[in-house]
Image (cartoon, rainbow, N blue to C red):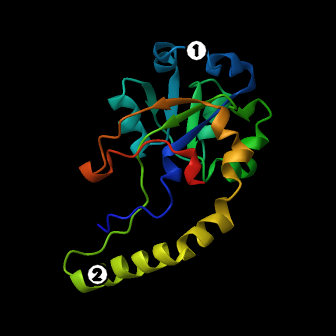
C-alpha cells in the first residue's frame, strides 16, 4: 500500500439519498439513536455495510447497485449513501428517474476512506516510483490541480459546510488512516 491518500478522503464524506417524504427523518435535530434505527440500503459486498454495522446502524445488505434505487423507492429501506465525489452523478444517472427520491441536504456521514494505490508486494521498485511520483506532484501542486479540476466546487454545491456531520469509525482501514477527520477546508 502506498500510504498517501490522493483524493482528500472525499469518498468518506457520505451523502444520503432518501425518499422526499422522509426529509424530516434526516433533519439536524434528529438524534444519533434515531438515525441508527433507520435502515441503510447497501448493495451486497460493499464495505459500507460493515462500516455502518460496526457503528451500530441498521443495514439492509442486499441486491446490487442496479436495483438499490428501486428498492429505496419501494420502501425496503430508508436511505442509501454515496461519496461526495459521486453522489451528484449517481443521482442524476440513476436515482432521479424515481421522482420520489432526493439527495438529503441536512446530513452527512463521515468515516476515514482514503483512496490509495496498492502495488504487488513483489514489486517494491514500482512502489518506490509511485511514492516518489506522488510526493513530486503533491509538492509541485499538480495533484491539487488535478483534484480541483474535478471537485473544486463540491463543498459549495453539496452544502457540506452546513450539514450535520455524523462521525463513524471505519474498522476496515489500516491504523495509519484512523486519524482522518472531516476537514472541509481541504477542498
Instruction: Name which residue lies at 28% across and 81% down.
Output: 128
Q: Position of residue 31 (x, y in %)?
A: 52, 14
- Quadrant where the C terminus sits is bottom right
75, above or below 156, in the image: above
Instruction: Name which residue lies at 64% across and 37% down.
Output: 161
52, above or below 89, in the image: above
Q: Is residue 31 left or right of residue 116?
A: right
Do the numbered discs 2 and 1 sit on residues whose CB atoms are within 8 Å? no
Look at the image and tell me whether residue 123 can be seen.
Answer: no
Q: CA distance from mark 2 to mark 1?
A: 47 Å
Other-residue count near label 1 (Cα within 10 Å), few / some / many at <14 / 14–19 / ≥20: few
Q: Name the residue nearer the viewer: 113 or 180.
A: 180
- Label 1 SS: loop
Look at the image and tell me whether residue 114 can be seen.
Answer: yes
Q: Is residue 51 left or right of residue 157?
A: left
Q: Name the residue nearer the viewer: 62 or 185.
A: 185
Q: Position of residue 137 (x, y in %)?
A: 48, 78
Instruction: Name which residue lies at 34% across and 76% down.
Output: 131
**Mark linked to residue 30:** 1
**Mark linked to residue 3:** none
Other-residue count near label 2 (Cα within 10 Å), few / some / many at <14 / 14–19 / ≥20: few
- Label 2 SS: helix
Q: Position of residue 16 (x, y in %)?
A: 60, 34
Earlier along the polypeptide chain: callout 2 or callout 1?
1
Give the residue pinned by disc 2: 128
Amino acid at each position: 500500500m502506498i500510504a498517501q491518500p490522493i483524493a482528500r478522503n472525499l469518498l468518506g464524506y457520505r451523502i444520503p439519498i432518501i425518499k422526499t417524504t422522509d426529509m424530516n427523518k434526516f433533519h439536524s435535530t434528529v438524534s444519533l439513536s434515531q438515525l441508527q434505527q433507520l435502515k441503510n440500503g447497501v448493495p451486497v459486498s460493499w464495505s459500507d455495510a460493515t462500516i455502518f454495522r460496526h457503528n451500530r446502524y441498521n443495514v439492509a445488505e442486499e441486491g446490487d447497485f442496479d436495483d438499490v434505487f428501486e428498492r429505496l423507492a419501494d420502501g425496503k429501506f430508508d436511505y442509501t449513501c454515496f461519496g461526495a465525489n459521486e453522489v451528484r452523478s449517481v443521482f442524476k444517472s440513476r436515482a432521479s428517474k424515481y421522482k420520489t427520491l432526493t439527495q438529503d441536504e441536512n446530513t452527512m456521514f463521515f468515516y476515514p476512506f482514503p483512496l490509495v494505490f496498492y502495488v504487488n508486494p513483489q514489486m517494491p521498485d514500482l512502489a518506490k516510483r509511485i511514492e516518489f511520483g506522488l510526493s513530486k506532484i503533491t509538492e509541485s501542486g499538480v495533484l491539487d490541480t488535478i483534484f480541483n479540476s474535478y471537485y473544486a466546487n463540491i463543498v459549495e454545491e453539496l452544502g457540506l459546510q452546513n450539514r450535520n456531520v455524523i462521525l463513524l469509525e471505519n474498522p476496515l482501514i489500516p491504523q495509519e488512516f484512523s486519524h482522518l477527520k472531516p476537514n472541509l477546508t481541504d477542498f
